[in-house]
Image (cartoon, rainbow, N blue to C red):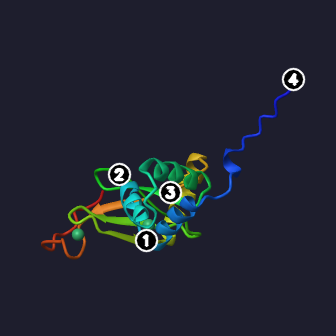
Amino acid sequence: MRINCMCTANIQPATSQRKLLLSVIREAKGHLDAKELYRRASKRNASISLATVYRNLRFFKEQALIDERHFGHTRSCCYEMKRSEEHYHLVCRDCGHVIEFESPLIHKLVAEIRRKNNFDVTRVELCLEGYCHDCKKEEKPLSKVT
Ligand SMILES: [Zn+2]
Ligand SMILES: [Zn+2]
């Protein structure tokens, strides 16, 4: 007997909980961790569980709908909607404020690294840590990068 082993897990219809979670991430316009996503989503649908949140985050990642980020020294996972343009992050070590930035120089750098190492780069995660405008206590000269 032949068993047709087509995986159906990925073609199940979007549930209302899934739609809700995606719209919470979209409306946040920033970076949410799983617990914050759960807190916001459960206000709108009390039957959502943290397990549902984690399961759907995995699903969204597999479908390339969201990006997972690892900010700061805790390296905790944050999520945001995937965008067509890559962007990068500055994270304040004091208040945790996240600033997004883009730079064409990074594309050049990646292209060079790719060529020199014969390595196919598929994803770039760049996070610079430091102190934001409000937390910067005194004007310190940047230590020389050698
Ligand atoms: Zn700060
Ligand atoms: Zn971002």
The amino acid at mark 4 is: Met
Q: Secondary structure at mark 2?
A: strand
Q: Nearer the viewer, residue 35 or 95?
A: 35
Secondary structure of residue under mark 4: loop
Residue that mark 4 sits on = 1
Task: Report whether residue 8 is seen.
Answer: yes
Image x and y of residue 14, in percent: 64, 59
Dividing the image into 4 quarters, which one contains the N terminus? top right
Where residue 136 sits, quadrant-wise, is bottom left
Left or right of 132, for residue 86? right
Residue 111 placement (x, y as % from top left): 57, 59
Give the quadrant of residue 30: bottom left
Q: Which residue is mark 2?
A: 76
Residue at mark 1: 28
Question: Camera-side residue: 24 or 114?
Answer: 24
Query: Label 2: how many residues lie within 10 Å, few (<14), some (14-19) or many (20+)?
Result: few
- Residue 124 is tagged as 3
Counting residues from the start of the chain, the first of labels 2 and 4 encountered is: 4
Q: Residue at x 16, y 70 (%)?
A: 140
Tag nearer the camera, 4 or 3:
4
Q: Closer to the camera, 69 or 21?
A: 21
The reply to whether discs 4 and 3 touch (Cβ–Cβ < 8 Å) is no
Q: Are marks 1 and 4 in contact (CB under 8 Å)?
A: no
Q: Counting residues from the N terminus, which is met first, the one under dot 2 or under dot 3?
A: 2
Dots 2, 3 in contact, CB < 8 A: no
* Label 4 to label 3: alpha-carbon separation: 46 Å
